[in-house]
Image (tube, coloured by chain):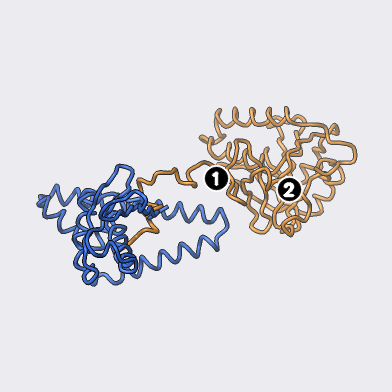
Chain colours: A blue, B orange
Amino acid sequence: MSAAEVPDAREDAARIDRLLEDLQGMAGPSTWLAIEELMERLLRLHGAGLTRTLAHARAAGADGPRLDERVAGDDLLSSLLLLHGLHPHPLRARVERALEQVRPALGSHAGDVELAALDESGVATLRFLGSCSGCPSSRATVEHTVRRAIEEAAPEIVAIRIVGEDAPASKVVLQQVER
Amino acid sequence: MNLRSLRRYAVGRAHRPAWAAGERCELCAAQLDAGHRHVVDLDLRTICCSCRPCALLFEQPGAGAGHYRTVPTRVCTSPEPFDRERWEALSIPVGLCFAFFSSAAARWVITYPSPAGPTESELPLEAMDELLASSDLLRALEPDVEALLVRSPRGGGPIEAMLVPIDACYDLVGIVRQGWRGFDGGDEVRAGMDSFFEALHRRSRPLPEGGGAA
């Protein structure tokens, strides 16, 4: 299923973002704590349900690798599995795949991007290659696109470092992706 | 699809959630120590757990536009014997109850702990007036936040009456409700009540001359 087929889920996600932001400003401290507890308990319940569903699918004889491919290819399901730490693909594979998917979109900016390193603390180092590594404005567009793709495919990445082709230490950009 | 705002609520998060960190002040959400204070919400007629700063704030008369009132801590006894005749004129059917003045209802309310939780009834005002005239403890009660706790022994004997914080009364309600077995409550409830009363006696002081507000 493609992203275009789940417009309601995207709308829900955006609305949840907005409501949480608004509520934090509106609620008193004890109400806000109760809202956070409610969110956590609801998510925990749904996460447990997803875990059990996958376990049942496997136990019922579903072809493991095919099942993994299908759920990973479903935009909504993939996002939910990531949320609950249940995604079938390991972190590195997800980052690599996100870069693969974003490459054609780099299009006219040409150049290429590769995963130079991925450390245990969740910091990804990307290396830009080719012409787009030089020009500042096209570089910014490319960086933005790549960051968004990685953030979505691998939300556990805490920071993305970007180095140029020659990888001089002085050009390292460290940006916090998530709190 | 990006569910970033939900990540902080999903399992596997690194920090311990704030709501699971133990009891919190129901007014400001600060973490509570053991033996915290309580504040009565006069509009909702509920008791809220409260941190020390909030309790101090609502000790001031009129703070919070009279919406909240901190439960005092004093426990007082009176050297005067409690007037059994006037008490019995109220025809209270049980041996254990507490009475307080409800400012929302503008009358005296009497509550009995029972296995089903607290049971309330309103007292006839005339009979209460007579009892008030005879009891310095009743006259000294702060409305809503203090109560007169009364225990009359089953086989007769002097009635025991104490001025207590209202939260202590609800502790007693909890002891009765949770421990009640069979028809008469059973040994567990009796033992629980005895140690509850012993602890109150240890805290108690004679009521100062003239009653004195808390």
Label 2 element class: strand
Q: Is A121 positioned to the left or the right of B212 in the image? A: left
Task: Say yes or no: labels 1 and 2 on the same chain.
Answer: yes
Q: Going from the N terminus, do you reach mark 1 or mark 2 first? A: 2
Q: Label 1: chain?
A: B
Q: Is B104 positioned to the left or the right of A75 in the image? A: right
The residue under label 2 is: B100
Q: Quadrant of residue A162?
A: bottom left
The residue under label 1 is: B116
Q: How many marks?
A: 2
Q: Position of residue B101 (x, y in %)?
A: 75, 51
Q: Label 2: chain?
A: B
Q: Is A57 positioned to the left or the right of A34 in the image? A: left
- Name the one closer to the observer, B82 or A133: A133
**Callout 1 amino acid:** Ala
Q: Residues within 10 Å of mark 1 (few under 14, many from 20)?
A: few
Label 1 element class: loop
Compared with A26, B19 (above or below) is: above
Compared with B206, A96 (above or below) is: below
Q: Residue at x 40, y 68 (%)?
A: A15
Q: Position of residue A37 (x, y in %)?
A: 45, 51
- Please name which of the two marks, 1 or 2, marks the residue nearer to the observer: 2
Compared with B208, A161 (above or below) is: below
- Name the one closer to the observer, A151 or B190: A151
Q: Position of residue A34 (x, y in %)?
A: 50, 53
